Structures are given as structure tokens and as C-alpha cells.
Image (cartoon, coloured by chain):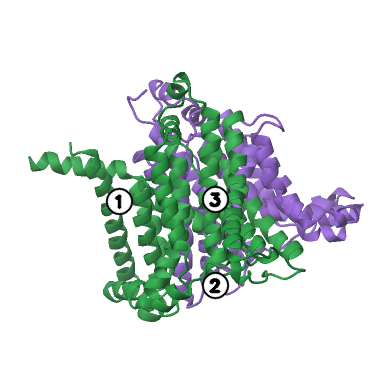
Chain colours: A green, B purple
Amino acid sequence: MPSNKLFALLVPIVSVLMGLIAGAIIMLVSGFSPIDGYTALWNGAFGDSYTIGETIRRSAPYILTGLSIAFAFRTGLFNIGAEGQVLVGWLAAVWVGITIDAPMYIHLPLAVLAAAVAGGLWAFVPGILKAKLGVHEVIVTIMMNYIALFTTNEIIRKVLTSGQTTTDSIAPSASLASEWMQSITFYSRLHYGILIALFAAAIMWFIIQRTTIGYELKSVGFNQHASRYAGMNVSKNIVLSMVIAGMFAGLAGAMEGLGTYGNMSVTAGFSNLGFDGIAVALLGANTAIGVVFAAFLFGALKEGAGEMPTGAGIPTELVDIIIALIIFFVASSYIIRWVIVRFKKEGK
Amino acid sequence: MIEILQSVIPTALFYSAPLILTALGGVFSERSGVVNIGLEGLMVMGAFVGIVFNLTFSDVLGAWTPWVSILVAMVVSAIFSIIHAVASVSFHASQVVSGVAINMLALGIGVYLTKQWYGKGQTDMVAQPFYTTDIPLLSKIPVIGSIFFQGIYITSYLAIILAFVAWFVLYKTPFGLRLRAVGEHPMAADTNGINVSRMRYIAVILSGALGGLGGSVFALTIASNFSHSTIVGQGFMALAAVIFGKWHPLGAMGAALFFGFAQSLSVIGSNIPLLQDVPQIFLLIAPYVLTILALAGFIGRADAPRANGEPYIKGSR
């Protein structure tokens, strides 16, 4: 039996390859050339400095939603609510960005913090319900997503504007936009958010690997009963894990609100940052470093997809299909392991 | 008063039909122990197939088109749901993750093919949707007839009848008993000679069929075309109905009717005196808030089937 570390690396790589092969087959079947398609995808993601900048920009919120789901997962919780936490974080960041007037060194941290707090609060509800009443967090977080969607829309329409569908732009003192980063990437929308995202990944690694809190969180994830007998406060750890996960997702909202768009619009549906984050966390094996790599992969796929219709006539949704298939393959890693073990046996 | 009921009840029935159908699918799947977050995706698939079939064959089939369309959508979604069954039953994948992937996959496939076949992000409007009808005889009953049976979609009653059928199947047949047993205690069921995997496959496929039916009914009564925003959240609302209805077919139907009612109020509420003053937002979020409250035990206790969400691995304890 090969070591677990090898598997941990092999499963995501095999899954991504299988996903890309499946994508190629779909292109062939629907009469497109996979080579043209993947060339367009590559050019769309890494073709010039502008697209590289956009790819990095797109990866920043993926890192954060990926961290959010991965972090909760380490405590045995499934945070499907990243979607809603992103929205409330986005709203909070924009709200602070518009209404408060302060110098940058206060305003920007305050807006970023507001996003994290809002996301954390939104995740507190499913956390406390799980900890105190044993309500399954998956359902509650899904419901919270829709409550967030409708509530943020309503606040944009009724509170932040009078009947408009888009808020004003945030004050420059709350903006993450970076002229320096834009200038080296041919005026893409790349902003300082990527640094926050990478810093957040480092924080997750530190909490999980180097602190007592992280040890307890992981312990609760492995076995709640054993943790309770060992004297840990399971309820507290569940709530804490959800809140921290929510804060990561809220920060992802700040990336969009303070960095990419500088405002917020009424939407009919979700941004899908939260759902894609599930894929990122899975592919990254719920580790901080894995999430960063997976987020860049997904950022590149999503950004490159934009080039596929013009470059090869292929609808962008092909990438969504590929991502969905990758999720299936990673989730079914049991069977990939089984096949690998079979191969090893027959090789001997 | 009667006038208000005349406008509210048909609209409520109209909005709840797809929710009822999809929620019944959710009940079957979850009762067998397979969590189905993928209801949304199954509805998307149903809506896509229903619309495309309708557009393609409306010249040939004429007035029968919508009925054949929902049947075809049902079959295709049932086949599509096998992916979820394979991943979550045979490959022991996390059922929630697999459900999320189903949602992404269905939307991806639907929009991809729409763009390829129609050259744009949304299809044309269908020529043969469902139309409202008066139900013969029943619509002649004074008062009740005009509220419940005039200007109504037959699909609404189809959904309600199917809810009773589902109840009968789950609670009055050996098949239903086995299905529920597999969801409560798969090992005990296995010991008694029930094929756990087979039961779960059947349950998931049934949920695919019903989800497809729900999605296509939604598409052919409410939306009339297919795009990426045809089904946004109806599947999750059906999931909420499953839980709010405590995993019982009739409960789920009641919950779906109530959610449909809430939706219809948010649409036509501005014409009703008392509700004019209630901000629309409360009606929009009501289904979701109520589901959380129900789960938290504030509105009776909602307990999931015991083995819901756990892959059954033979021989493990």
C-alpha cells in the first residue's frame, strides 16, 4: 500500500487530469477541436500580463472561500454557506467603504474587518444551532445563503440607495486597488487582495498546525466524543470553527467589494464563489497550501474560459462542466485509490 | 374575500406544483439515507430537457407536446441522477459534495448545449406550454369551484395526487417499508436480506425522475424558456420543504404548498389590503427562516432519517 502522502497528491492530480480529458472528449463530441479549445483556455489565463493579472485577481476570493470550507471541514463541519457569507461580507465592506469618511490607514482595515465580522456573524447562526441543538449545519447554511441573497438585495435597494440596483462606488481610501499592480499587469483589475488572501492562508496554516486552538478544532473533527472525554469544550470549538470559516468567506466578499468592483449590485443568483470554494477545498485536501494551489488552478480555468468563445467558439460553460467532473472524481477518490491499489498489486 | 381567494389560491397552486414534485423526490432519496442537495440540478436538467423537447417536437405532437415533454424530462433526469447514485452509494463519496457537483454539472451541461444548439444563452419561448383550464364538473361547484377549479393548471393537481401516491408507496407497501428501513438502519436492513445499495439506487433515481418532473413543470408553466437563470433556488426551496415537512410526503406537500403560497403572496401581495404593508422581503425569506426555525425545534421537532448522509459500507460498524 503506497503511503498516504503519495495518495494525497495523486488523487487531486489524477482527478484534474481526468476532468481535462473528459472536457476534451466533450469538445470532440460536440465538434470542436480540443487543442484549439485548450490553447484558447491557456491564452485566456496566461496569454499576456493582463490575463495573468486577471487570473491572480480571480484566484484571491477562491483562496478565501476555499480556506473557509477547508477550515470548517477540519472540525468536521460542512460550510455550504460560504456563498451567503461572501454576500454579507461584500455588503458590509461596501457599506463601510461608502458611508465612513476616514484616512486610508483606518478606513481600509475597518472595511476589511467589517467584511470578516459580517461573514463571521452569518456563520455564527449555523454554528450555535449545531453546537447547542445539534441541527445539521448543511441545511442551515443553505437556508442562510438565500436569506443573505434576498436581504442584501433589499438593503442595496432600500437602504444604501433609493431604489437603485447598484450602490455608489466606495471611497478611494477604502479601496484595495493598486496602481502599481495594475501597471505591471497592463491595467488589469489586480488589487492588493491577493496579499490578504495569501496572508489568510498562512493564518489558517498557523492556527491549525501550531496552536492549541487548532489542535482542539482538529480533535473535534476527528472524534467529538473522545475530545469531550479529554476535557475539550466541543460546543465552543464548533462555534469557533464556523465563525472563523465565516470570516474567511466574508473576506472573500471584501475582495470583490473593495478590490474588483468597488461597489455591489443587486443579483438574481449567487456569485458561485462559495460553491466553487467547495471544489477548491476538496481539491486542496483541506490544507492551506493545497487550497492556494487549487484556487490558482480554478482561477486560471475560470479566467481562461472567457477566451474560449472568441478563441475557439466553445461556450464558457465547458469549464463549469470540467470543474463539476473534477469534484466528482475527487469525491469518489475511494475508487481512484482502489484502482491504484489494484494496479500496484498486478504490477508485482 | 372570495375575490382575493380566487386570485391567491390558483397562484399558490401554480407556484407550488414544481416544489411539491421535487420535494417528493427529495423525500424518497433522503428516506433511503441519501442526502440530495442535487435537487436543484435535477430540476435544471428537467427544465432544460422539457424546454428543448418542447421546442423540437411541438410541430409533430401538437397539443400533447407539454405532456410528452415532462415525461421525457422525467426519464432524462432519472438517468442523470444515476451519477449521484453511483458517486454516493457505490463510490462512498460525500453525498453533499456529490450533490453540489450535480448542481454545477446540470447547469453547465444545460447552458453549454443551449449555447451550442441555439447559438445564444437562452432558448426561444416554447410554443406549447401548459395552459390554464377549468376542470369539468368540479369547476361548476358554487364558491369552491371558482376558487379551486377554474383557471387552474392540471399539473398542480397532478402534483397533489402524486404526493398521496408517494405516501401510499412509502407507508403502505413492502417496498416503502424497506426503503425507510434502509434509511434508518442500513445494517439491520441488510441483515434482513434487503439489498441496501439497490434500494438506495432506486430511491435516488426516483428523486431524479420527480426532480425532472418538477423542473419541467416549472419550465413549462412559469418560465417558458431555458437559460442559466431559469431555476434559481427552487430546488433548494424544495429541499427546505422536505425538511419542513419532516421527511413525510404529505408534510412535504403541505410545506411546498405553504412556500408556494408565500411566493404567490410576494408576487400578488400588493393587491391584498392586509399584506400591502408587509415588505416583500419578509415573504421572500419566509420559507428559509421557517425551515431554520423548524430544524431548531421551535416549530415541532424535525428529525432526519437516522442514517441520512452516511454511505453504507458492508461489514463496517
- SS at badge 3: helix
The residue indicated by pointer 2 is B122
Amino acid at the residue labelled 2? Gln
Mark closest to the chain's N terminus, 3 or 2:
2
Q: Is residue A87 left or right of A322 when viewed as pictured?
A: right
Residue in front for this viewpoint, A96 or B304: A96
Q: Which callout, 3 or 2, points to the residue nearer the camera?
A: 2
- Label 1 packing within 10 angstroms: few (<14), some (14-19), many (20+): many
What chain letter is assigned to the residue under label 3? Answer: B
- In this figure, which residue is indicated by the disc labeled 3? B211
Callout 2: residue from which chain? B
Residue drawn at point x = 52 percent, y = 44 percent: A244
Q: Position of residue B288 (x, y in %)?
A: 67, 46
Pick out the residue farthest to the top: A229
Return the residue found at the far left. Answer: A348
The CA span between labels 1 and 2 is 34 Å
Taking depth in this image into account, of B254 and A17 the one nearest to the observer is A17
Answer yes or no: is residue B164 visible: no
Chain ID of residue with mark 1: A
Looking at the rendering, in which quadrant would you find the N terminus of chain A? top left
For residue A12, the mark is 1
- Mark 1: which secondary structure? helix
Q: CA distance from mark 1 to mark 3?
A: 31 Å
| Residue type marked 3 | Gly
